Structures are given as structure tokens and as C-alpha cells.
Image (cartoon, rainbow, N blue to C red):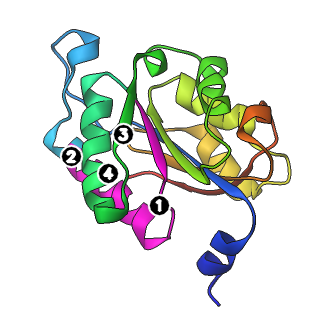
Amino acid sequence: MTEISSRMKRDVKHLILMRHAEADWGLNDFDRPLTKRGHQQAAQAGAWLAERGYIPEQIMSSAALRTRQTTTWVSDALGEKGPTAHLDEGLYEVGASRIIARINGVSENVRSVLVVSHLPGIQDAAIQLTHPDSDQNVAMEMFYGFPPSSVAVFEVPGEWALLDGADAHLIAFKSF
């Protein structure tokens, strides 16, 4: 049994936190589109998630254009297994506590969720949720930067509603 398949069979939930892919400038912030590179980054992130078996059952995305586009490219890479994203204006220009509050509202029937949002909130939420027993090399990489299209994957041993700080195990971090 591979590391990935044994990890997915354990009775834990998976939380995936992602920063939107590279966005263009020049428009109002909410309506900034992805660059060509951003489209590629998002597709690569989706392919990486699919290859590792991190298929979200639910996707929550900021309603900003760049996060909607990121979510579309990630979903395309996930193929038939990718769920329809829920757009959430409450994930735009918010801090870690608001992002975590949105995660707390996820149904306990959902075993894996992807949240696509913005800096600094998405990185701050990832840092706040990282359990001290997480892989320190992976954690340090995430702490030092969360560039566009970065993905942090956590194992969550308890209920979504109780997730608040230092209780999720960071198992992977990748930037594209």
C-alpha cells in the first residue's frame, strides 16, 4: 500500500488551503483576472492534488474573479471527481479567523474541503491551524512564503466545527 493510499484510508478529514494563482493588475482588486501563467499554475495545482488523491468533496472559493478562475482551472484538472465550487463573498479580504469560521461551518459528512482565498488571510489561517507535530521542514517552507497558487494540505483528526488553532497536521505544501 502506498503512503498516499494509506493516508487517505485513515479516519481523518483533509483540509486544503490554497492561495489564488497569479493575477494581473490594473483593474479594481475584486475584478483582477488571472494571468496566462496563473491559468497554468492553477491547472498544475489541480493536477498535483489529483495525482496525490487529495480530491475535495467541497470547494469554497472567494467570489473575487481571480479565485473563481483559479477554482475553475483546479476543478478542470480534477476532472469528474471535482465538485462544483461554492462562491463565498465572506472569503474576500478577510483574516484567518473568518476563514477558519467558514471551515467550522462545513458539514461533518464532508471528509475533504478545499478553500481558495487571498493573502494574508489564507497563509495566516494555515499557520494558525498547523499542529506543532507537523513536519517541520514542510511547515517552515509554508511559514516563509505562500506565493500565488500555493497549496497546503492538512489532516484534521476532529470535527470541522472544533477546528481553531494548532490542531491540524500539515502534511504537504507545494507552490506552482
Q: Residue furthest bottom?
A: 1
Question: Which callout, 2 or 1, points at the residue further toward the start of the chain?
Answer: 2
From the viewer's perspective, is residue 124 above or below residue 159? above
Q: Which mark is residue 39?
A: 2
**Quadrant housing the N terminus:** bottom right
The residue that label 3 is drawn on is 85
> What residue sits right under mark 4 in the picture?
74
Residue 31 in the image: x percent, y percent?
A: 21, 17
| Residue at the spot 31% in from the left edge and 52% down from the top edge | 75
Residue type, mark 2 in image: His
Q: Secondary structure at mark 2?
A: helix
Q: Is residue 4 magenta?
A: no
Q: Residue at x 61, y 79 (%)?
A: 5
Q: CA distance from mark 3 to mark 1?
A: 13 Å
Say above or below: 12 vs 5. Answer: above
- Work out how far the residue at label 1 is from the one at label 4, CA to CA, in angstroms: 10 Å
Marks 3 and 2 sit apart, C-alpha to C-alpha, by 17 Å
Element at label 1: loop
